[in-house]
Amino acid sequence: MDLSGNNALLDSELVAFFASRTPPEQAWQLARDWAHKIALTDKVVISGFHSPLEREVYRILDSHRRPVVVALGRAIYRKIPPLFHAAYNDRRLLFVSLRNHSRPSLSNSQIRNWAAADFAEEVVFAPFPPSSALSTLHHTLRLGTTKIVVLE
């Protein structure tokens, strides 16, 4: 595992957030509302912040100046993407990479999602279609002891 940023964030109460690349329409407002609420707590969100809806949640958290953990399905960035500059420079961000591959893939994204869920004390899903790759993660996590929330 490779880390870059504020490693102390891993000691926080982590909440994983997942959203499909093709969420149903109602997922957008539910996720925005959730992001504004979680931003008022001491919890730290861990996510890939890869799908458009996950990026929207990141922007909301960043506007509240909340720390986040970005789980990568690839190697650590050599150059920090502009989206993450301010938070990284303010030590409000930690990148976690479990793979040395430089390009994302379905396999790497699944590893990223499982790792993010494993780090978290609670896992939150925006509504997703049954065909989503998140279905397997959601179903499997429901069988364990991690607190699972699907926004409704």
Image: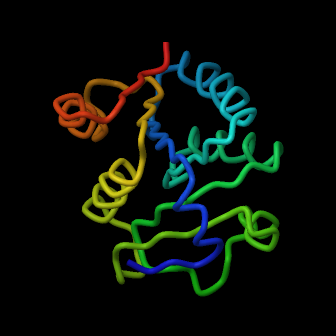
Q: Is residue 134 left or right of residue 68?
A: left
Residue located farthest toward the top when viewing the structure as drawn? 152
Residue 79: image quadrant is bottom right
Residue in the foreground of this view, choosing between 42 and 108: 42
**Placement of 27 over or under 3, stated as above or below:** above
19 up-or-down from 79: above or below: above
Name the spot of residue 147 as percent of width and height, x first: 36, 30
Question: Left of 25 or right of it: where is 33?
Answer: right
Residue at 72 percent of width and 36 percent of height:
39
Spot occupied by residue 2 in the image (x, y as percentages of width and height): 44, 80
Give the percent coordinates (x, y) of residue 24: 47, 21
Q: Nearest the camera: 93 or 109?
A: 93
Q: How is the image coloured?
A: rainbow
Who's the residue at 58% across and 72% down the image?
7
Rendered position, 3 above or below 25: below
* Image position of 39 (left or right of 9): right
Classify residue 61 by image quadrant: top right
